[in-house]
Image (cartoon, rainbow, N blue to C red):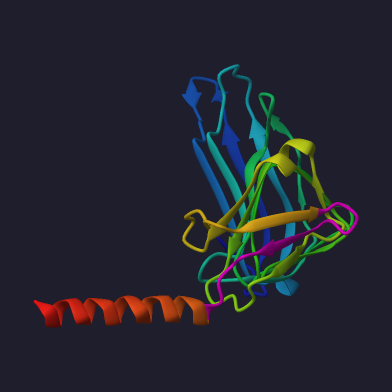
Amino acid sequence: MVNAADPSNKVSVNYVYGLSGEYVEHADKVNILFTGNGENLDVRSVSAIEHSDENASADERVISFGSQDNAFVGQFNGEISNVKIGDQNQFNELVIGKGSSVEFASNFELNVDTLSIFSDADILGVAKITVDDALNIYISDGTSASDLVLDLGESIILTDQSQANISVLHEDGSLFDGAEVAYDPQTNSFAISNVPEPATYAAIFGALALAFAAYLRRK
């Protein structure tokens, strides 16, 4: 985890996979998390150091800007070298976390399998982030609108495959039943409807509580 709120942060994040001589350096899981105020962060690079091995792999490779508890807000001026692991993207997933606002530099380019973004997060800048397989949209708890728009801006490029694999999820990752999604390629935005208002949830739970109380009285 890199806390960008520390003004002394000047980082290069490197990880190793494959074989190096007689030693196995195999990264099954690579999770890089940036949190805090990105204005204070100097990221030189995030890169994979590849050693020759036809079986080399990293099964879970996630890069996140913000988490459930700690948002990332600010500019990201570093680069992520877009090398492949075999024929796979360097990162399986790019996550833009709850309450995060990330402004990528114009020279930022990255291909990822999956983009996961919270409904209250923003992606800014004119980077080129290509989503090859899937888009996950997380509806943050406390979302007050029954119809919301998620604007992916100029930085996100969705392939036909990723547009066909869209999931709308609760904040906890469970599937949001009944949510409807419409994509506008002209504005690169999604309209998400049939998301209940928090007041609707309260009414539902209140009705259930009254019914349960009545049931107990009958017993």
The magenta span reads: 184-198
Looking at the rendering, which quadrant does residue 17 occupy? top right
Residue 64 visible (yes or no):
yes
Closest to the observer, 201 or 16: 201
Q: Residue 39, image x and y in percent?
A: 75, 73
Query: Considering only vertical position in the picture, is 177 above or below 139?
Result: above
- Residue placed farthest to the left in the image? 219
Q: Residue 141, image x and y in percent?
A: 52, 72
Closest to the observer, 22 or 182: 182
Q: Residue 42, image x and y in percent?
A: 74, 64
- Residue occupying the point 23% across, 76% down: 212
Count of marks overlaid on the render: 0
Looking at the rendering, which quadrant does residue 47 occupy? top right
Is 180 displayed left or right of 74 in the figure? left
- Residue occupying the point 49% across, 35% down: 28
Residue 145 is a magenta residue: no
- Residue placed farthest to the top in the image? 54
Q: Quadrant of the N terminus?
A: bottom right
Query: Considering only vertical position in the picture, is 172 above or below 196?
Result: above
Closest to the observer, 204 or 132: 204
Is 205 displayed left or right of 196 in the figure? left
Q: Quadrant of the C terminus?
A: bottom left
- Residue occupying the point 28% across, 82% down: 210
Closest to the observer, 143 or 29: 143
Residue 109 visible (yes or no):
no
Is 69 displayed left or right of 145 in the figure? left
- Residue occupying the point 60% across, 16% down: 54
